[in-house]
Amino acid sequence: MTATLAPPTRVGKAAVGALGVLAVATGALESVVTPTLPLLQRELDMSPAEGALLSIVLLVTGALVTPVAGKLGDRYGGKRVLIRLMAVVSAGGLVSALAPNLPVLLLGQVLQGAMVGALPLAFILVRAHLPEGASKVAIGLVSGLFVGGGMAGTLSAGPVAEGLSRHWMFALPTIAVIGATTLVHGLMPHDPPGRPDATGIDWPGLVLLSGTLVTLMLVLALAPDIGARPLVLGALIVVLAAFATGWIAVERRAAAPMVDLRMLARPAMWQSCVLTFMICVGTSVAVYLVPQLFAVPSHAYGFGAGATEIGLYLLPGAVAASLAGPISGLGVRRLGSRAVVGAGSVIMAAALTALAAAHSEVWHLVIGKMLIALANGLCVTAMVTSTATSVDRSDTGIATGLVLVTRVIGFAVGAQLGGALLTAGTPSGSDVPAESAFVTGFVVAGAVTALSLLVARTMSEGDKK
């Protein structure tokens, strides 16, 4: 009898709680660079281009590592891969904390980016050790705590960096990651490998998938500067097409492919990826625009808020995002993923449309951002849960990893779209975008979110077709 037929060891709340603590710690470590980028640029004498590179290098690594970590977790066991991955992340956090200059900090961020792969590994453990109903709630809990940790890191990074130093804003969450990893190692039992390892790793598929994801993230990062670097961007697009074409050709012929393309063709899989992309584009536009609108001078049409005030204004959204995961898990268990995604899409589209029409008071933006954060958490968690429970248990890691990579790409596209709209809407000789640029951004984001409802209506409920 193979290991996949052995009955799983059931775990209690303490083991799931350890995964939740790890999700909070990794979410916090992931998010500390963005709110402190101006401070890092001053202290490390970075140019704007170097600052942009620092802001995306973690996303690039995360997009690369996540599907690989998920596939290895499916094959060799989620806990085994998770502990090793967290060792890399901890090393990256320590390198970032001790970094005396930009090259060393970039190295630390490259290593830290592996943390994004922790989520599919956590989902593997949850499915292996909990019954289906409880696993849906647990997936929602872990997802929500990761988002909540990210918001906590966003809010605390600035005060820690200014009150202590930039070194401590990396060191504190890294210490938390090390402690949480120790808890997971002690409380969570090992899960058996998903399938016999007779064929080895699909190295050609791994290399081509990695090249595809890295090139795609570079294209998204350079897209706003297309006017200044059209040849570079054009060359990258050609390289991207070559990588993607080669990857598809290799995976179709591989005996044990890195990603089974037949799995991608299942309705539950492609629908989750499409919906995740559309929802995250809408969310990311708002995530980019709302703080910018808070910061617009009060003598124009904004509020002249500083970094600390903006953090406080975004706090209700952080709370909503933290609660959305568990709520979504319960909703999927009782109502189904399609109902939860549909409700979340309606809430987000309505909130974005309302922000386009009314944004003259602080509470307009606070409530709007809170509803968007809640809706995003409901939708993404429901889609991850639907994906995790619609594929074979041995494919949980790679399937959820691909959905999470789609989430990263959606956020990158949305942020670039928001930045491009504000740049295009800034009059010559002015530093303040026209108010119409914000209105256009909210309308476009709302339209993308509303279109997602067409896909949500056809969403399957976890059938393994």
Image: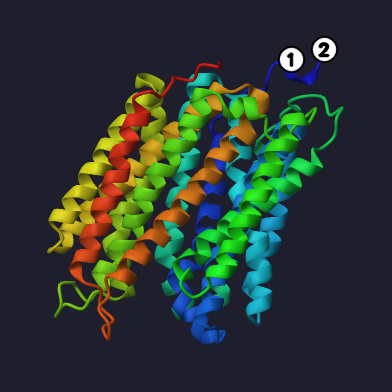
Tag 1's secondary structure? helix
Q: Position of residue 231 (x, y in %)?
A: 57, 69
Q: Are marks 2 and 1 in contact (CB under 8 Å)?
A: yes
In the image, is 444 to the left or to the right of 244? left
Residue 1 is tagged as 2
Using a 10 Å C-alpha cutoff, classify the residue at mark 2 as few (fewer than 14 neighbours), some (14 to 19) or many (20 or more): few
Return the residue nearer the eye: 244 or 348.
Answer: 244
What count of labels does the image hold? 2
Amino acid type of the residue tagged 1 in the rendering: Leu
Q: What residue is disc 1 on?
A: 5
Quadrant of the drawing holding the C terminus: top right
Q: Is residue 437 above or below residue 322?
A: below
Q: Residue at x 37, y 30 (%)?
A: 455
Tag 2's secondary structure? loop
Residue 450 location, quadrant: top left
Return the residue nearer the eye: 179 or 220.
Answer: 220
In the image, is 299 to the left or to the right of 10? left
Q: Position of residue 352 (x, y in %)?
A: 23, 49
Amino acid type of the residue tagged 2 in the rendering: Met
Return the residue nearer the eye: 241 or 74.
Answer: 241
The answer to whether residue 93 shows anywhere in this view is no
Q: Residue at x 59, y 33 (%)?
A: 399
Q: Position of residue 454 (x, y in %)?
A: 32, 30
Quadrant of the drawing holding the N terminus: top right
Q: Is residue 256 above or below residue 241?
A: above
Using a 10 Å C-alpha cutoff, classify the residue at mark 1 as few (fewer than 14 neighbours), some (14 to 19) or many (20 or more): few
Query: In the displayed image of the protein, which residue is found farthest to the top?
Result: 1
Figure colour scheme = rainbow
